[in-house]
Image (cartoon, rainbow, N blue to C red):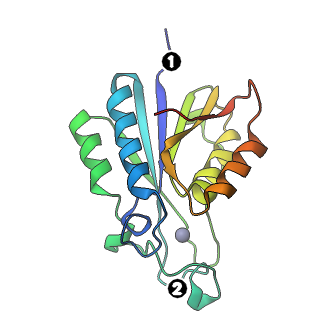
Amino acid sequence: MKQKKIVVIVDEQYDFCRGGALEVPGATRALAGTCRFLEQFKDDISRVVLTADWHPITHCSFVKQGGPWPPHCVQHSHGAAIHERVLQVLHRLELPYEIVTKGKHRDQEEYGAFSQPRKLFEGRDVWIMGLAGDFCVMETALNLRKSNPARLTLYAPGIGSINAKNFNRLVEEHTAPRSKFRLFKNS
Ligand SMILES: [Zn+2]
């Protein structure tokens, strides 16, 4: 029997979307790509994990504390909420999902979720997408690799990057022909 997919949707929160505090170019397209993916593969998905950047208001990554970013995804703020476009599709398709938060410690940047290996992903067919490709998506993908999935696919139509060139360079660096880690380009 063909193995069902686990889908990891990274940081599709209002602050990273159009008009948000840290808008990622191509976020609207990435959200649409994510929704299309869920529709297309709904019968082929066993589980969806949403990650959420979830910072205390004095987080070290914010400019005021000497970090590189404007304040974003402050815990319980509107900007930290998962975009309703994605939630609505998940509800309509009745796909089970969980939300995993990261970046909760004031003194620690945490681009990637799942820094500790998780049994959930071991030997599984894992698909990853979201925002931003060159930071949190890539870092989460590299973390997920440590959980030893059977295959790990970056779904490009569902990914938006702060710097697309950097994202492509990172993909090239980490994927190889016949690798378990690969980029899916077509929508
Ligand atoms: Zn952050």
- Near-viewer residue (123 or 87): 87
Q: Where ligand 1 lies, by quadrant?
A: bottom right
Residue 109: % across, % down: 63, 70
The image quadrant of residue 78 is bottom left
Mark closer to the chain start, 1 or 2: 1
Quadrant of the frame with the C terminus:
top left
Residue under the image location 64 percent in, 43 percent down = 144
Which mark, residue 58? 2
Specify whether 130 is left or right of 41: right
Q: In the displayed structure, does residue 108 sit left or right of residue 32? A: right
Report the residue that reaches farthest toward the left: 92
Query: Closer to the camera, 83 or 6?
Result: 83
Quarter-of-image position of residue 108? bottom right
Question: How far is mark 1 from mark 2, CA to CA?
Answer: 43 Å
- Vertical side of 131 occupied by 92: above or below: above
* Amino acid type of the residue tagged 2 in the rendering: Thr
Q: Amino acid at mark 1?
A: Gln
The image position of residue 131, as x and y in percent, is 50, 56
Q: Is residue 75 visible?
A: yes
**Residue 29, labelled with which disc?**
none
Furthest residue in direction bottom, as rendered: 64
Give SS at disc 2: loop
**Label 2: few (<14), some or many (≥20) within 10 Å?**
some
Q: Are marks 1 and 2 in contact (CB under 8 Å)?
A: no
- Picture coordinates of residue 31, whole percent (x, y): 38, 50
Between residue 39 and residue 61, name the one nearer to us.
Answer: 39
**Which residue is rendered at x = 67% and y = 56% of the image?**
165
Q: Which residue is mark 1?
A: 3
Residue 125 in percent (x, y) is at 56, 27
| Residue at the image point whose x is 61% and y is 62% from the top | 163
Q: Secondary structure at mark 1?
A: loop
